[in-house]
Image (tube, rainbow, N blue to C red):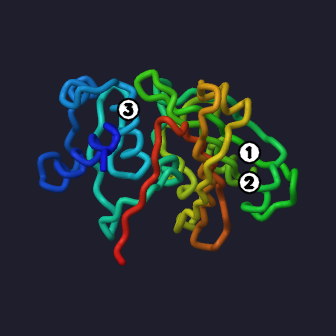
Amino acid sequence: MYAPKYVRIMETLRARIKDGTYPVGSRLPSEAQLQKEFGTSRLTVVRALNDMQTMGEIERAHGRGSFVRSPGPSGSQDSRPGLAVLDRQETAESVRLLEVGRRPAPAEVATALGLAESAPVHLRRYVGVYDSIVSELVSLWAPVDVAVSAGLDQEGPLTVPVRELVTARSKDRLTRVEERLQARRPTEAERDALGLAEGEPVLTVLGSVVDSSGRTVLTVAVVLPGSLHVLESSYEL
């Protein structure tokens, strides 16, 4: 069966990571080098790298490149968009903030956080940008007390990952992320924020972040352009 070029790029990079060509912590070839090797466009290369980052296989740093991450305990390659958001270190180049402040909780968010609908929550919304290409729209919702104590209410980029900020405020560590994936048509606001073409679908991920006391302390909504992402999972039978 014919595989799209971005899939072939991902498969090749995964094979090289597995055989030790690119060990954990090493930098992958640049986008320009991958374009030349695979004879494809920059957008195709970016899609492959974005998907590998979404699945926790690599980490991308603006101006520095893409680096191989250590696999999870089981060595699986599961889609982990929520975890990627929690572990991201924001920079002025990689994140463009759209809004920060208190908002009424939408029904879905209120349910996830165990709050009454329209209860005040803190919203942090931004688009992720990688080498000038808008890759995702992220909405991070938190109870007001969590946001204030963790410093999620600051206007500029968070130079410390969200996971570390939230964990530092409490003795309760973050223990799991429960995610739900959906493909749908974007809203007008999502289309504008992501610069989507007419008719282009999006993949949405709604993740609930739970701490060791059992409290849901964050809700992460990630909207991914359908033309730039495919989410995969690999597991033992």
Dot 1 or dot 3, earlier in sequence: 3
Q: Quadrant of residue 19?
A: bottom left
Q: Position of residue 1 (x, y in %)?
A: 30, 50
Residue matched to label 1: 122
Q: Are marks 1 and 3 in contact (CB under 8 Å)?
A: no
Outermost residue, bottom side: 237
- The three-letter amino acid code for the residue at tag 2 is Pro
Q: As rendered, which of 165 and 236 lies closer to the eye?
A: 236
Residue matched to label 3: 46
Residue found at x 64% / y 73%: 214
Q: As rendered, which of 3 and 35 lies closer to the eye?
A: 3
Residue matched to label 2: 143
Q: Are marks 3 and 2 in contact (CB under 8 Å)?
A: no
Measured in 3D between alpha carbons, the distance from the residue under mark 1 to the one under mark 3, in whole angstroms, is 31 Å
Mark 1: few, some, or many residues within 10 Å (few <14, many ≥20)?
many
Q: Are marks 1 and 2 in contact (CB under 8 Å)?
A: yes
Dot 1 or dot 2, earlier in sequence: 1
- The three-letter amino acid code for the residue at tag 3 is Val
Dot 3 or dot 2, earlier in sequence: 3
Q: Quadrant of residue 10?
A: top left
Measured in 3D between alpha carbons, the distance from the residue under mark 3 to the one under mark 2, in whole angstroms, is 34 Å
Residue found at x 65% / y 42%: 139
Give the left or right position of residue 55, taking residue 119 as reference. Answer: left
Outermost residue, front side: 1
Give the left or right position of residue 52, taking residue 12 as reference. Answer: right
Q: Position of residue 180 (x, y in %)?
A: 61, 59
